[in-house]
């Protein structure tokens, strides 16, 4: 997720902006820049790469002024480059803007502005904002900003600096976080508390649809309609380490809680008012889908588990046969690949060496490659024929949570898009499923309100050295991810088994008190899974069942039951995964492990 910092006051702004940007490095970024109002007007310094590169430029060409804005960019529109880095300006260098979020209608706005004579120098969606503000400026900067944002559709946190009125900074929030820091003779803007914590602990938290006008000595808060509002000034008591984690104990817990936002961001701009699916910026078309006869999905680790669910989603919705391979094994089985084969490469980082090697092999054999990845400008993104970006934002903890669940959302949308292209789903069913997709973030938010019950279950299993997950269908695929999550951070030996395979050997491992987590969210398989629960109970297992709300019958057999909200059966993994992530998290925490940095593991595996 990008970072924003702004300053207006009595001190030189360059050092304050750089310091704030450095405090936001934990969020992940691929470029950085600042705009400062100097004696000669607005001046910019920006650079692809690390903040240290921007700092080097500023050492060679320093900027001096009492008002400025800065940004660290995580690319979403346009590859990482100096030109695409923020801040962006209008053609006359009078308006400078930094922006977090996604402007869904930027192509339409860009076309309209180009007809009016505005020239664009970047590939970003953000640049339209600076031109819109310039177009509406008639001597009143707050009014010009209000008019400009009224044209925007999507998510945005914006900071604006203008040569017309250099004694003001403007901040606007809609669906992307933004805070205002209040000092003595100086005020601040930040996308997150760490950016300003060194200078002030007094903050206003902007809500959606609110705007702030900052001067050196004052902060005015108002709605986007121009109505002034009063807010409570909050006192931040966190230390810096807690602040960069948003007040959570660990990055992993923070990222688990960020999943509703990640779901919304991955869906944003792709669900067409509940009636269809669109993937702007890709060349994937209905005609191309109709030419696909086979699909291969290649991935590693957690992405492989998302791919296993993606297989069932696509097959069930389209009836196209799908094979899933560990990318590290794909090349060595000599897969049968033809021109009518679509290969889907899944990688959070976009730099996974085995996945890159597999997709290169597929392209050489004539397949079309679609990438599902979280990082614009990554190797996977550059080499794929089409890209479906997830918008999970940077993931700091080694154990993946929101990246995995965003990949599931991507597979759901892809499956529905393909099904509609092939007419294997009617419009009424599509509309109903899109409505269920849109409810998922709210259902996850509700689950996250009851973490304490999961913590109590984690206390029960944290002292064990062996544990088993069982499930059928999608539940088995999800059980594999749940087992991996528990293993990699708690170091409890864990295995996932297809529940129907218990009699073929794995029952031999069950003894008195052995914890078994039984996933039973698929209604068509519920009776069979219930029978498997009875099998392990008869051999002394301590059973924790995870099922849908309303399935109280399992309470008669299981020792404990975790309930998750009901949704369309294919979408259930997106709600069921959350308590399983929390279970692994709390088990690891109780055992005293470093949850964010499990031993022997790395975030991105760039060697084979």
Image (tube, helix red, strand yellow):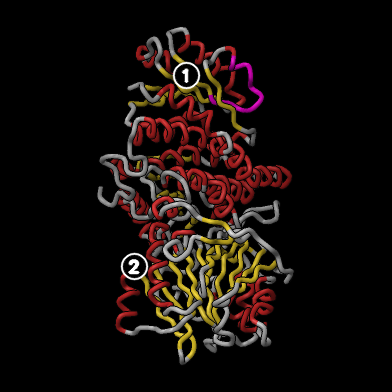
Q: Which residue is mark 1?
A: 500
Q: Are marks 2 and 1 in contact (CB under 8 Å)?
A: no
Q: Which residues are magenta?
A: 546-555
Report, in whole angstroms, how far the alpha carbon at label 2 lies from the one at label 1.
51 Å
Mark 2, mark 1: which one is toward the viewer?
Answer: 2
Quadrant of the rendered image containing residue 570: top right
Query: Does residue 563 appear left or right of residue 242 in this picture?
Result: right
Say if the magenta span includes residue 549: yes
Q: Position of residue 86 (x, y in %)?
A: 47, 73
Q: Residue at x 53, y 69 (%)?
A: 99
Q: Which mark is residue 50?
A: 2
Q: Secondary structure at mark 2?
A: loop
The residue drawn where x is 63% and y is 22% is: 551
From where the camera sits, is residue 369 visible?
no
Mark 1: few, some, or many residues within 10 Å (few <14, many ≥20)? some
* Looking at the image, residue 108 lies above or below residue 572: below
> Is 145 part of what is drawn in magenta?
no
Q: Is residue 51 above or below residue 362?
A: below
The secondary structure type at the circle numbered 1 is: helix
Sequence-wise first label, 2 or 1: 2
């Amino acid at each position: 997720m990008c970072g924003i910092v702004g300053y207006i006051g009595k001190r030189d702004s360059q050092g304050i902006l750089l310091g704030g940007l450095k405090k936001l490095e934990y969020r992940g970024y691929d470029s950085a820049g600042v705009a400062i109002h100097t004696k000669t007007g607005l001046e910019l310094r920006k650079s692809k790469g690390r903040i240290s590169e921007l700092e080097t430029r500023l050492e060679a060409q320093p900027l001096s002024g009492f008002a400025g804005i800065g940004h660290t960019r995580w690319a979403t529109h346009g590859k990482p480059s100096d030109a695409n880095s923020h801040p962006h300006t209008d053609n006359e260098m009078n308006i400078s803007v930094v922006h977090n979020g996604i402007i869904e209608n930027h192509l339409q706005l860009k076309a309209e502005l180009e007809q009016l004579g505005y020239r664009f120098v970047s590939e970003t969606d953000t640049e339209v904002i600076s031109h819109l503000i310039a177009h509406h400026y008639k001597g009143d900067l707050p009014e010009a900003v209000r008019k400009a944002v009224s044209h925007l559709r999507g998510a945005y946190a914006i900071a604006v600096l203008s040569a017309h009125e250099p004694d003001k900074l403007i901040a606007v929030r809609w669906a992307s976080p933004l805070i205002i820091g209040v000092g003595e003779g100086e005020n601040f803007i930040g996308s997150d508390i760490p950016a300003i914590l060194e200078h002030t602990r007094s903050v206003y938290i902007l809500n959606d649809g609110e705007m702030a006008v900052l001067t050196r000595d004052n902060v005015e808060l108002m709605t986007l309609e121009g109505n002034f509002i009063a807010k409570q000034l909050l006192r931040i008591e966190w230390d810096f380490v807690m602040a960069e984690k948003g007040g959570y104990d660990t990055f992993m817990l923070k990222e688990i809680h960020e999943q509703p936002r990640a779901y919304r961001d991955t869906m944003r701009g792709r669900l067409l008012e509940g009636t269809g699916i669109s993937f702007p910026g890709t060349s994937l078309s209905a005609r191309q889908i109709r030419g696909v006869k086979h699909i291969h999905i290649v991935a590693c680790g957690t992405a492989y588990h998302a791919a296993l669910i993606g297989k069932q989603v696509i097959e069930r919705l389209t009836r196209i046969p799908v094979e899933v391979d560990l990318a590290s094994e794909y090349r060595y089985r000599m897969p049968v690949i033809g021109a009518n084969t679509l290969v889907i490469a899944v990688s959070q980082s976009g730099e996974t060496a085995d996945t890159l090697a597999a997709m290169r092999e597929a392209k050489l054999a004539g397949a079309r490659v679609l990438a599902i990845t979280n990082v614009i400008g990554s190797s996977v993104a550059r080499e794929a024929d089409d890209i479906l970006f997830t918008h999970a934002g940077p993931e700091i903890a080694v154990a993946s949570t929101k990246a995995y669940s965003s990949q599931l959302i991507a597979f759901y949308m892809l499956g529905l898009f393909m099904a509609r292209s092939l007419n294997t789903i009617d419009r009424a069913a599509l509309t109903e499923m899109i409505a269920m997709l849109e409810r998922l973030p709210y259902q996850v938010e509700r689950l996250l309100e009851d973490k304490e019950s999961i913590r109590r279950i984690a206390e029960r299993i944290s002292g064990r050295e062996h544990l088993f997950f069982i499930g059928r269908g999608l539940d088995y695929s999800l059980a594999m991810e749940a087992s991996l999550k528990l293993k990699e951070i708690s170091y409890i030996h864990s295995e996932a088994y297809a529940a129907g395979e218990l009699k073929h050997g794995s029952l031999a491992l069950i003894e008195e008190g052995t914890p078994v987590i039984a996933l039973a969210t698929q209604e068509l398989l519920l009776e069979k899974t219930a029978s498997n629960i009875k099998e392990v109970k008869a051999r002394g297992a301590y059973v924790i069942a995870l099922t849908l709300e309303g399935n109280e019958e399992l309470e008669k057999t299981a020792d404990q039951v975790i309930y998750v909200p009901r949704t369309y059966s294919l979408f259930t993994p997106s709600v069921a995964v959350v308590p399983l992530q929390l279970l692994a998290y709390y088990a690891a925490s109780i055992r005293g492990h470093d949850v964010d940095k499990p031993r022997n593991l790395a975030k991105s595996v760039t060697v084979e």
